[in-house]
Image (cartoon, rainbow, N blue to C red):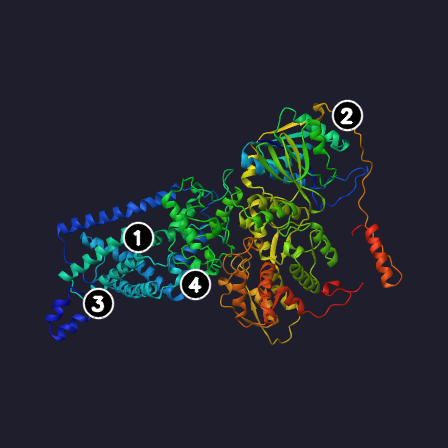
């Protein structure tokens, strides 16, 4: 624009107006001298060389990492769909942060539109331009690109203002700074678009067109080498990361061989992990949603990923240096509740849970992790087969007291009690209510005489030995009893049986009681009109892990008009119990459970509906400190049972102790 | 420091116990086995001593083939090698017979320290360890909570009755029987299990040890404890009833 300014100043008002009215044809320089062509060639080679100086290192580091033993490229359908939806449509970016997400999408789509424009732009410099600005297609395409350029320029300016002036906290680094380089990159992108658009205001073949052409080219060629030095590396890597993802949520890869104990040193970092680590765009969505980071703990999922990047940059993938050391801390790794918000939110396809659980595996499988509560939990699982460390006879007494039928192969469902349902007083109440509903519906079910923990806390804390022992022992027990369908009140049991046990056999079909209850809701009596309101808390392992959101809500709605918490459904905030943390000691910072209860109470609901015995027990403790004004806390099974007509008094299943 | 830990495999704590057809022992089919609890603490003490002062920890156990599993568990937790006295008829021996087998099996080892659990969770005799020490002619002490290595040997913390403790010193070699609960047990790790596979586990046939002798003690029969619940009404005025109650609590139930 500056280039045309002198001529505008000297011109008449009419000429001024004419100069301000853009033509519909993009101006191109007429010809290029030989020295210009040679200069262009030298600049391209120089820029490409600088680019590779850094990018080549990254590529070599990724390729030098250990191969992912379980990686399979097929089936391609899912990969193609993920690529289309998450990369091309930018669906995840937009859905989770609509306004900045859309701005980002416009920048991305402009880059796509500019692929052809840029190729033609450089080709023009060598006299090989293939798009005629005056031709029908050329004119159309350049104008289309101009629309994108305009949207891109506005978007990048907006994103610049957001990053440097609005400054959302999760964009800041540990020391509360934002990277200056992303400001430079934003400036370059803006300049790219401006120099393109400006060519509509200058005559074709003019010196001004030539100057604009060179400005555009220089911007482009200085942008390229900067990409691999900055988080803008995601531009190149993240489409690949999304395409090559492990495929299912929170997938913990099998250990490769006898020397694989999880993420212990650089030698254990796999190619996929390395690729993901270099794809991180530092947007902080993971941190924004992390229950640990939000309650003042050391853990920050973004810093876990960037810590691995720092490690790879300093030591490389073959190093024997421990991963938990300079760049990542053991304390942080063991503060994760495995709620999965980070992985769920990540727009560039980073899978945080295999990394965090992998670091824990490395520490636990080698005995490096020493924790009084953790050690006690593992010994309880080893010796008693349940996470609460109680004698099996306690469970047997409960079965006898409640007159629960023993599963003998003739019943449709095996009712899986889990540690909470079998041993915990509150979990037992939930079982009691759910059994009441099943009896009302006439569902045939039975309970296993003996049952061990599914191994969920051991799995998430990284104890492969205990997990394998429990999974194998349970699988054998279920096979012996010819169980085909399991129903459970615990989302952790459901997930672990359905997914994690697959490493050691074929688990029976399993569903969560919310799915069962919703399916049979039509056969249950319609509830009386309710005056209160109910807020449903989505358990992580039911929502994000299993994609079940509406079923428990339809049951919860029986107890009152549904209201939603500030964070709900796929953005739900953890109760603090997951990842084995329910069994560990005092938390650093605020308690996750109390923070979540605060969010739920803030809705003003008279009932908090839960669908997980772990959430339930966490909330019960957190609500206890709130005194009498606290809302009542019920599992959806209890809500469903309360709406049933009263049972004959002689039936012990109605929850009331009957005099014998 | 060369330490031998004698461990015993016992039925798991909350196993459903049935008496076998002979009436002399419990039916062992369908039962899972564990490391005896106080032996697990003895092993932990040995591992802590090794970590602090270096040396070797050797696990010693007698019994049928399944005992190998418990020895492997001890190797997985950090013991260096194992000795398995293979015998399918251990139940026919008394504590002296088992101690003789052990003494013969470790005759060439010359350890600085032998640790065992205080007593077994199944028979609860509490004798095998001290008899072993007598057979080997080394000093011993039981109910040990803490072991500290000092210049002249060992400084120990013993548990006495009624909340009393005693500090004693012993020269080495010595044998100690360890009380449960004073340290935190370590959990078994995958790496430990994998390493255990490569560690030496020597099996010695009990018959080859030539200790055969008739047991001086025979287990005649075992029975499940029968649950008894009786209600007694204490007549008289409240003062008389209270006096009768105190007398019963003191003399019959012995809780006062």
* Classed neighbour count for the residue bearing mark 4: other residues with Cα under 10 Å, few (<14), some (14–19), many (≥20): some
Circles 2 and 4 on the same subunit: no
Residue beneath label 4, please?
A: A96
Q: In what element is the residue under mark 4? A: helix
Q: How far is disc 3 from disc 1 in space, using C-alphas?
A: 33 Å
Residue identifier under label 1 = A227
Q: Are marks 1 and 2 on the same chain?
A: no
**Badge 2: chain ID:** B
Crowd tier of the residue under label 1, counting other residues whose Cα lies within 10 Å: few below 14, some 14–19, many 20 or above: some
Mark positioned earlier in the residue sequence (3 or 1): 3
Q: Classify mark 3: residues with Cα within 10 Å, few (<14), some (14-19) or many (20+).
A: some
Name the spot of residue B10 as percent of width and height, x first.
70, 39
Q: CA distance from mark 2 to mark 4?
A: 80 Å
User: Residue at label 3?
Assistant: A24
Tell me how far mark 3 sits from mark 2, CA to CA: 112 Å
C-alpha span from label 1 to label 4: 25 Å
Task: Give left or right: position of B12 versus A125.
Answer: right
Disc 2 residue crowd, few under 14, some 14–19, many 20+, Cα 10 Å = few
Mark 4 or 3 closer to N-term? 3
Nearest-to-viewer mark from 3 and 2: 2
Q: Is A587 situated left or right of A317 in this image?
A: right
Q: Position of residue A409 (x, y in %)?
A: 70, 51
Quadrant of the image for the N terminus of chain B? top right
Q: Are marks 4 and 3 on the same chain?
A: yes
Q: Chain of mark 3?
A: A
Q: Which residue is mark 2?
A: B213
Q: Mark 4, mark 3: which one is toward the viewer?
A: 4
User: Residue placed at 58% from the left, 53% from the top?
Assistant: A583
Q: Position of residue A524 (x, y in %)?
A: 66, 68
């Amino acid at each position: 624009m500056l280039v045309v300014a002198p001529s505008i100043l000297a011109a008449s008002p009419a000429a001024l107006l004419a100069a301000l009215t853009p033509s519909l044809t993009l101006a191109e320089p007429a010809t290029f001298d030989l020295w210009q062509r040679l200069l262009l060639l030298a600049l391209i080679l120089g820029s490409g060389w600088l680019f590779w100086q850094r990018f080549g290192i990254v590529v070599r580091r990724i390729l030098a990492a250990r191969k992912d033993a379980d990686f399979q490229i097929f089936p391609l359908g899912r990969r193609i769909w993920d690529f289309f939806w998450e990369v091309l449509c930018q669906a995840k970016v937009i859905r989770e942060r609509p306004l900045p997400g859309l701005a980002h999408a416009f920048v991305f789509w402009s880059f796509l539109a500019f692929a052809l424009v840029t190729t033609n732009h450089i080709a023009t410099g060598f006299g090989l331009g293939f798009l005629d600005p005056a031709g029908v297609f050329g004119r159309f395409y350049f104008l289309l690109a101009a629309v994108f350029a305009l949207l891109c320029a506005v978007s990048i300016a907006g994103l610049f203002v957001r990053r440097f002036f609005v400054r959302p906290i999760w964009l800041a680094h540990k020391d509360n700074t934002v990277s200056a380089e992303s400001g430079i990159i934003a400036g370059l992108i803006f300049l790219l678009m401006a120099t393109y658009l400006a060519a509509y205001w200058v005559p074709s073949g003019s010196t001004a067109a030539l100057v604009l052409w060179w400005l555009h080219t220089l911007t482009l060629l200085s942008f390229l080498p900067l990409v691999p030095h900055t988080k803008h590396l995601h531009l190149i890597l993240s489409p690949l990361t999304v395409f090559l993802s492990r495929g299912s949520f929170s997938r913990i890869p099998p250990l490769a061989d006898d020397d694989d104990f999880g993420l212990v040193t650089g030698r254990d970092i796999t190619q996929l992990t390395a690729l993901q680590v270099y794809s991180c765009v530092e947007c902080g969505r993971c941190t924004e949603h992390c229950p640990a980071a939000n309650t003042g703990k050391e853990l920050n999922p973004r810093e876990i990923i960037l810590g691995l990047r720092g490690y790879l940059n300093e030591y490389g993938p073959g190093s024997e240096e421990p991963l938990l050391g300079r760049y990542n801390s053991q304390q942080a790794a063991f503060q994760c509740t495995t709620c999965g918000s980070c992985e769920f939110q990540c727009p560039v396809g980073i899978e945080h849970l295999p990394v965090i659980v992998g670091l824990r595996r490395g520490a636990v499988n080698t005995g490096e992790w020493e924790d009084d509560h953790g050690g006690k939990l593992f010994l309880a699982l080893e010796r008693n087969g349940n996470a609460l460390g109680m004698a099996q006879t306690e469970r047997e007494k409960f079965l006898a007291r409640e007159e629960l039928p023993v599963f003998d192969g003739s019943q449709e469902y095996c009712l899986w009690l889990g540690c909470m349902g079998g041993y915990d007083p509150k979990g037992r109440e939930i079982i009691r209510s759910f059994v009441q509903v099943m009896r009302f519906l006439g569902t045939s079910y039975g309970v296993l005489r003996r049952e061990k923990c599914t191994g969920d806390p051991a799995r998430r804390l990284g104890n492969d030995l205990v997990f394998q022992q429990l999974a194998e022992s349970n699988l054998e027990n279920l096979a012996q009893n010819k169980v085909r369908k399991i129903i459970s009140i615990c989302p952790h049991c459901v997930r672990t049986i359905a997914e994690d046990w697959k490493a050691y056999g074929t688990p029976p079909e399993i569903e969560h009681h919310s799915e069962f209850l919703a399916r049979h809701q039509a056969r249950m009596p319609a509830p009386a009109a309710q005056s209160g309101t109910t807020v449903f808390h989505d358990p992580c392992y039911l929502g994000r892990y299993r994609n079940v959101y509406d079923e428990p809500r339809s049951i919860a709605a029986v107890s009152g008009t549904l209201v939603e918490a500030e964070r709900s459904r796929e953005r739900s905030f953890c109760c603090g119990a997951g990842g084995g943390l329910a069994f560990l000691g005092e938390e650093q910072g605020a308690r996750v459970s109390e923070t979540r209860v605060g969010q739920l109470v803030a809705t003003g609901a008279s009932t908090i509906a839960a669908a997980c015995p772990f959430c339930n027990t966490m909330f019960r403790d957190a609500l206890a400190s709130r005194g009498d004004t606290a809302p009542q806390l019920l599992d959806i099974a209890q809500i469903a049972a309360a709406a049933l007509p009263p049972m004959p008094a002689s039936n012990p299943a109605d929850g009331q102790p009957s005099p014998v | 420091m060369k330490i031998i830990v004698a461990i015993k495999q016992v039925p798991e704590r909350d196993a459903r116990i049935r008496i076998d057809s002979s009436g002399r022992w419990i039916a062992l089919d369908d039962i899972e086995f564990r490391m005896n609890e106080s032996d697990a603490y003895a092993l932990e003490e040995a591992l802590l001593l090794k970590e602090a002062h270096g040396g070797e920890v050797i696990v010693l156990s007698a019994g049928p083939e399944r005992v190998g599993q418990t020895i492997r568990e001890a190797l997985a937790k950090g013991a260096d090698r194992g000795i398995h006295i293979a015998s399918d008829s251990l139940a026919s021996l008394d504590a002296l017979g088992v101690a003789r087998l052990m003494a013969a099996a470790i005759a060439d080892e010359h350890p600085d320290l032998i640790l065992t659990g205080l007593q077994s969770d199944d028979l609860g005799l509490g004798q095998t360890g001290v008899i072993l020490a007598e057979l080997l002619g080394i000093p011993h002490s039981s109910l040990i909570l803490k072991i500290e290595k000092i210049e002249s040997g060992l400084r120990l913390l013993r548990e006495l009755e009624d909340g009393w403790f005693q500090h004693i010193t012993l020269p080495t070699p010595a044998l100690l029987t360890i009380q449960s609960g004073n340290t935190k047990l370590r959990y078994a790790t995958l790496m430990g299990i994998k390493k255990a596979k490569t560690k030496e586990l020597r099996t010695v046939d009990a018959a080859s040890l030539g200790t055969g002798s008739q047991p001086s003690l025979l287990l005649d029969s075992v029975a499940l404890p029968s649950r008894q619940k009786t209600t007694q009404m204490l007549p008289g005025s409240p003062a008389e009833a209270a006096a009768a109650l105190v007398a019963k609590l003191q003399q019959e139930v012995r809780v006062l």
